[in-house]
Image: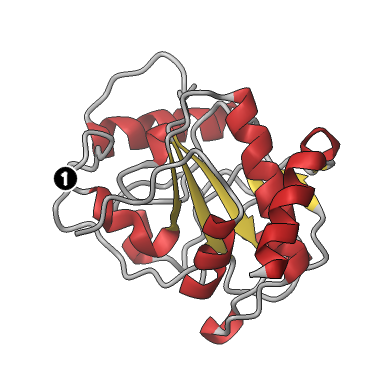
Amino acid sequence: MLRAVFLLVCAYALIEACEIKQTPINFDESRVELTKKYIKSSYNLDVEDIKIIPKIIIIHHTGIDDFNTSLSWFIEPKLLNNRPYIAMAGNVNVSAHFMVEQDGTVHQLMPDNIMARHVIGLNYNSIGIENVGGADFKDNLTLAQLEANVRLINHLKKKYDTIEYVAGHYEYRCFEKNALWLEMNENYRTVKRDPSERFMRDLRKNIKGFKEAPCD
């Protein structure tokens, strides 16, 4: 409990000191067009651009314990051929807005006001934060990552007062009956376990002003 209180005090004191390294992935015009096609096929929306109004922050882990290897999965615009089940919903590659190393270094991979592909049903209104770690489903996200997530989430809430929810990726299906859910294909679901429930509990102890995922 003392650690949680300490983190909360530090996070609010350091909100302006949320250092973010710019580490852009390849988000060229082809990726924009693939994203538009994904929005049309998955959400039945015709859009002129891929800008979003963020309502949710989704917390992930990469399932890989190395930053550069984790990053390599997101760099190219088109989905790799070894992910056929994901490809059934579109060929735009997976992505996230931010990635946090195990030492707490925060990288911004793409603008936080355009759509990333990181969560079924909620891409069009969410910001994705990936945390390096969780290989073999181990609960190995660090205290430094927790502190960085708290600072980053508070920074994003200050930037976008539209953000209502913070949820773990494993909670995404809790939104299926929520107005924010957009996925049209009832058969397109995957089992997610990231990040750990422990990490989300610790995170929620240290942030204020957010709704939890609307799980039954």
Give the residue type that dot 1 points to.
Answer: Lys
Name the one closer to the observer, 55 or 150.
150
Residue at 43% in and 65% down: 83
Residue at 16% in and 58% down: 187
Residue at 64% in and 39% down: 154
Q: Decide: is 74 above or below 24.
A: below
Residue at 35% in and 37% down: 38
* Left or right relative to 80: residue 83: left
Residue 5: give x, y in percent of width and height: 68, 59
Q: Secondary structure at mark 1?
A: loop
Residue 157: give x, y in percent of width and height: 58, 32
Query: Can you name the residue that lies furthest to the top here?
Result: 48
- Splitting the image into 4 quarters, where does residue 171 fall? bottom left
Residue 200: give x, y in percent of width and height: 51, 64
Name the one closer to the observer, 52 or 178.
178
Residue that numbered label 1 is attached to: 177
Count numbered badges in the picture. Answer: 1
Q: Quadrant of the C terminus?
A: bottom left
Q: Quadrant of the N terminus?
A: bottom right
Q: Decide: is 109 above or below 67.
A: above
- Splitting the image into 4 quarters, where does residue 26 fall? top right
Name the one closer to the observer, 139 or 190.
139
Identify the colour scheme used: secondary structure
Label 1 environment density (alpha carbons within 10 Å; few <14, some 14–19, many ≥20): few
Does any portion of residue 34 appear in the rendered image? yes
Residue 106: give x, y in percent of width and height: 77, 50
Q: Decide: is 146 above or below 19.
A: below
- Splitting the image into 4 quarters, where does residue 67 fall? bottom right
Q: Decide: is 214 above or below 138.
A: above
* Left or right relative to 182: residue 70: right
